[in-house]
Image: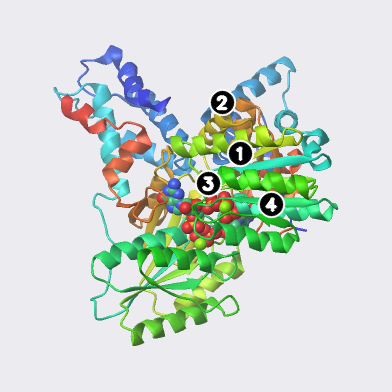
Amino acid sequence: MAFESLSEKLQNVFKNLRSKGRLTEDDVKAALKEVKMALLEADVSFKVVKEFIKAVQDRAVGQDVMSSLTPGQMVIKIVNEEMVRLMGSETTEIKLKPSNEITVIMMAGLQGAGKTTTIAKIAGKLKSKGRKPLLAACDIYRPAAIQQLQINGQKQGVEVFAMGTSHKPVNIVKAAVEHAGKNGFNVVIIDTAGRLHIDEDMMNELIEIKENVNVDQTILVVDAMTGQDAVNVAGMFNDKVGIDGVVLTKLDGDTRGGAALSIRAVTGKPILYIGMGEKLSDLEQFYPDRMASRILGMGDILTLIEKA
Amino acid sequence: SKTRNNIVSGIDSIFSGFSSIDDDFYEEIEEILVMGDLGINATTAIIEDLKKKVKENRIKEPKECKALLIKSIKEQMDIGEAAYEFENRQSVVLVIGVNGVGKTTSVGKLAGKLKDQGKKVVLAAADTFRAAAGEQLTEWANRAGVDIIGGQEGADPAAVVYDAVAAAKSRKADVLLCDTAGRLHNKKNLMQELGKIDRVLEREYPEAYRETLVVLDGTTGQNALAQARQFQEVTDITGIILTKLDGTAKGGIAVAIQAELGIPVKYIGVGETIDDLQKFNADDFVNALFDVKQEDE
Ligand SMILES: Nc1nc2c(ncn2[C@@H]2O[C@H](COP(=O)(O)OP(=O)(O)OP(=O)(O)O)[C@@H](O)[C@H]2O)c(=O)[nH]1
Ligand SMILES: Nc1nc2c(ncn2[C@@H]2O[C@H](COP(=O)(O)OP(=O)(O)OP(=O)(O)O)[C@@H](O)[C@H]2O)c(=O)[nH]1
Ligand SMILES: [Mg+2]
Ligand SMILES: [Mg+2]
């Protein structure tokens, strides 16, 4: 793979400058060209890459190369720090109300992103923490969407609230919350149909739900393999509907997942969990620093710097 | 019927904004291509080729340069009617791809298309893994008005395909369409499972014309190249179905795949209804690729 060598490439760029005291603009420019390529190959948005490179450049030029670091390592260190800063430096969880109240969570995203599967995964997680989740089947469009949620709900031992395909999603949500109140559920997770961010009618459907029901958390589910369009998608879901967090799915693949950085940059919202497989237990915490290394294609970033 | 919503002539504005062919001009083109998901390698190759041609032909006008660029990408992406030979033969179409890209939906749409042409179509529901995958395809079979052969959840997908071949033969089907479970290309066991399905078709249905379509989500970035490459190792891919082009994604990774692996795009998905599958049109595709400015501003 081309990326494994980013650190090597950076070392090469600086090969001849090993013991320079300060990083000059030219040094940094040459090095950051390699970083730029790596980020674009990882699908980080072109614009985000430009801004990122500029930020690193501004920080790096004139820096003292510490006696323990080579110029290459110094640039990597700054790149890594900027990246982690952008990604958010801590892991986050979905915010839940106290267990005597009902927390309403709405999942949204493009078609096939992994919403229905992720809902079942989250439900299982909440259940094991002693919560009592109810899943609301509001995808009235996709063939067999309700059955899919029901089968997954059954696997997780979590109840699914469904009203077929002839009611408006907003009414299904209202009824589900009422059902939850009467039957002692304290989390309602809404499975919505996949939709395009430019489909106004479908986006309005989500807005209507939020206008009529107190949705506590709106979570955008995004396929980690998404390319340059991730900024448009995340930006529009955030602007139109408003999102509180993101779940990145299918990270069990070999994608570098640059969309994570784009989404963070454009929405500022935390990435909560990552999907690591099709099994309903395959949901993991998101660690910003690990994601940063993955995007840069340098699993060894920290050791690389630490070893110095 | 629907067309890609972003087919507009934004190309001219890009190329007329420059009075000469300089570094800024090339940088702009580079930006457009990268933002269309072509990736750095394909983009660099295209720009290098363009620069060479500009020099050889002593081109001075950005506008002429545009014509050159568009022509060369179109030529690369162009496919003849021969690409759809399977529609006219007794054939079996294996539809594969990673999770959630639109395989089942595309099988449904394709079934509808073929049925409209008066073909007898049988569907094989060989995704026995994902929750309600069979029910989903059954609904599509109903919409298209075609037969479906399925298996229980957890059944061996190769066995389902085996049964479906038998059914296709006995019912004298023109086309057998096989839906498969989504699988990431880096999962060895799942790729082996696909190899097994491939061999069943090879062995049990040698008289049928083989078509193997990999479905790629048009929103996918550089990973689609790895997907195509890995699936290619397990089975001979004959074409791509590029889905979800009704959004704002350009699907430019298909250009990189065509360049590197020689796999042509045959169909595009432009929505969720049965009519939203179109034969690939290189002109429209390349035009949409260069129409970036409108959304930007
Ligand atoms: N490998 C892998 N597959 C996943 C993951 N999450 C979801 N999937 C798969 O992705 C496909 C789509 O998942 P769904 O949950 O149906 O996606 P969705 O967003 O609900 O889809 P629509 O309702 O059609 O918009 C299924 O095959 C899932 O099994 C993940 O983290 N890893
Ligand atoms: N907007 C749009 N949505 C599409 C298109 N093709 C498929 N979809 C949607 O994408 C989602 C996933 O489609 P499926 O056909 O279930 O995908 P799949 O590849 O069979 O998924 P798995 O079997 O889970 O791997 C569904 O919500 C479809 O309606 C398309 O061309 N445009
Ligand atoms: Mg769903
Ligand atoms: Mg499917």
- The residue shown at (56%, 36%) is B196
The label on residue B156 is: 3
Whether ligand 2 has any atom under 8 Å from the Cβ at mark 1 is answered as: no
Disc 4 and disc 1: Cα gap in Å?
30 Å
Under mark 4, the amino acid is Leu
- Residue B252, numbered label: 1
The residue drawn where x is 70% and y is 45% is B166
Q: How far apart, in angstroms, are the residues tagged by discs 1 and 3?
A: 36 Å
On the rendered structure, is B38 left or right of B286?
left
- Residue A31: give its label: none
Question: Label 2 belongs to which residue?
Answer: B44
First-in-chain label (1 vs 2): 2
Q: Nearer the viewer, mark 4 or mark 1?
A: 4
Q: Earlier in the sequence, mark 3 or mark 4?
A: 4
As measured in the structure, the alpha-carbon distance from the residue carrying label 4 to the one carrying label 2 is 42 Å
| Quadrant assignment, res A302 | top left
